[in-house]
Image (cartoon, rainbow, N blue to C red):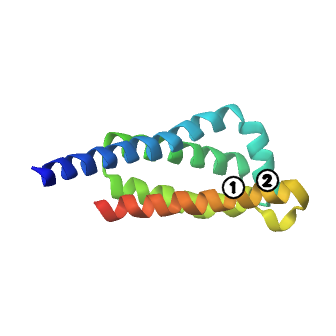
């Protein structure tokens, strides 16, 4: 009986984790649509070719892969896609080495947060 309760709790935690992690990416993708002009200029400033295309590719990946995780569809594949997205986007938008003061501290925080999110993604892949 106690094991049943623990297993039910673990299953509930896994579903909640998928909802939170996948939902965060889907939300971020939708938010990025609103901020697309600024984000495309930031991507272009990092000398990424075709910044608008790169941005839209990232937005589509965030939304679709995030929703796949929320819905429990091909979760390991969607998680790998989001991990690849993080590996590309993190140094692009959290380039703390190019900044000073408070801006540097904020970018370091974003970098560390993305590392933690990558850990959550790897945990999700490990559950599959």
Rendered position, 19 above or below 99: above
* Farthest residue, direction right: 100
- The disc placed on residue 110 is 1
Q: Secondary structure at mark 2?
A: helix
- Foreground residue, 39 or 110? 110
- The disc placed on residue 69 is none
Regarding residue 48, the answer to whether it shows in the image is no
113 left or right of 47 in image: left
Instruction: Kindly identify the residue that appears in the image at 47 percent across and 39 percent down.
Output: 23
Instruction: Kindly identify the residue that appears in the image at 40 percent across and 53 percent down.
Output: 78
Q: Position of residue 70 (x, y in %)?
A: 38, 41
- The disc placed on residue 44 is 2
Instruction: Kindly identify the residue that appears in the image at 28 percent across and 44 percent down.
Output: 12
Where residue 107 sits, quadrant-wise, is bottom right
Question: Badges 2 and 1: C-beta atoms under 8 Å apart?
Answer: no
Q: Position of residue 99 (x, y in %)?
A: 87, 61
* Farthest residue, direction front: 2
48 left or right of 58 in image: right
Between label 2 and label 1, give the one nearer the viewer: 1
Instruction: Kindly identify the residue that appears in the image at 82 percent across and 68 percent down.
Output: 97
């Amino acid at each position: 009986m106690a094991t049943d309760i623990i297993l039910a709790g673990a299953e509930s935690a896994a579903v909640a984790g998928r909802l939170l992690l996948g939902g965060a990416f889907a939300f971020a993708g939708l938010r990025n649509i609103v901020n697309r002009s600024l984000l495309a200029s930031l991507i272009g400033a990092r000398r990424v070719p075709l910044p608008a295309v790169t941005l839209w590719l990232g937005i589509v990946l965030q939304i679709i892969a995030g929703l796949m995780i929320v819905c429990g569809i091909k979760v390991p594949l969607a998680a790998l896609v989001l991990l690849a997205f993080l590996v590309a986007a993190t140094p692009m938008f959290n380039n703390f080495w190019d900044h000073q003061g408070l801006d540097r501290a904020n970018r370091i925080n974003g970098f560390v947060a993305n590392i933690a999110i990558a850990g959550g993604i790897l945990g999700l892949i490990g559950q599959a």
